Image (spheres, rainbow, N blue to C red):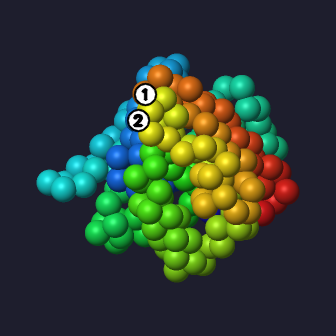
Amino acid sequence: MSFINYASREINCKIVYYGPGLCGKTTNLQFVYQKTAPEAKGKMISLATETERTLFFDFLPLALGEIRGFKTRFHLYTVPGQVFYDASRKLILKGVDGVVFVADSQEERMDANIESVENLRINLAEQGYDLDKIPYVVQYNKRDLPNVLSVEELRRELNPTNVPDFEACATTGEGVFETLKAIAKQILFDLKKGK
């Protein structure tokens, strides 16, 4: 649910990067943060316990324009990837406006990807969201590694509803901004429709 700050004339939108452990969620956020102009972003905050880490920061993209005289500020979050942090994942999904599912393209990670998508669907449903009705994109990360599945195989298993999807290598930045722009566009479209 976007939050409107009338004093600053900003609409605040929450994007959550979801996926299995070590798939590249944090690397995506770090790349975006490093490449975003200092005057357009807030601080990157890492909430770390002994066993898990959540990153988030906000930024105000200057090129996306305004909606009814309001600027749009995006807040980007990652969730802990490991399944036993489910309570944290649920909490981070609260009030989400859009989700980026980051899949690990390596063949041996397919089961973890599938488990994570199912977990995302369940956790969203518990919050009253339907994954098929909210802004959602899929990123096939780690395309630079030798043992990756074809995009067709990944798409068949992880993107049966055919949402926008992107090949990426978050360490080099390939596909990172394309993924972010696609989710931001969907969120802005929903806002303009008055959802």
Q: Considering depth in this image, is 21 or 131 the residue closer to the camera? A: 21
Q: Is residue 30 visible?
A: yes
- Whole-percent x, y for residue 163 in the image: 73, 54
**Residue 158 location (% of width, % of height):** 60, 59
Query: Of the residues under marks 1 and 2, which one precedes in the sequence?
Result: 2
How far separated are the C-alphas under marks 1 and 2?
Answer: 6 Å
Give the secondary structure at mark 2: helix
Q: Nearer the viewer, mark 1 or mark 2?
A: 1
Q: Residue at 41% across / 35% down in the picture?
A: 27
Residue 24, quarter of picture: top left
Position of residue 122 in the picture relative to residue 27 (left or right): right
Residue situated in front as seen by the camera: 57 or 178: 178
The residue at which mark 2 appears reads as 27
Instruction: Tell me the element at label 1.
Output: loop
Above or below, comparing residue 107 to residue 115 in the picture: above
Rendered location of residue 118, percent (x, y) = 52, 71
View extreme (left): residue: 50
User: Disc 1 designates what residue?
Assistant: 171
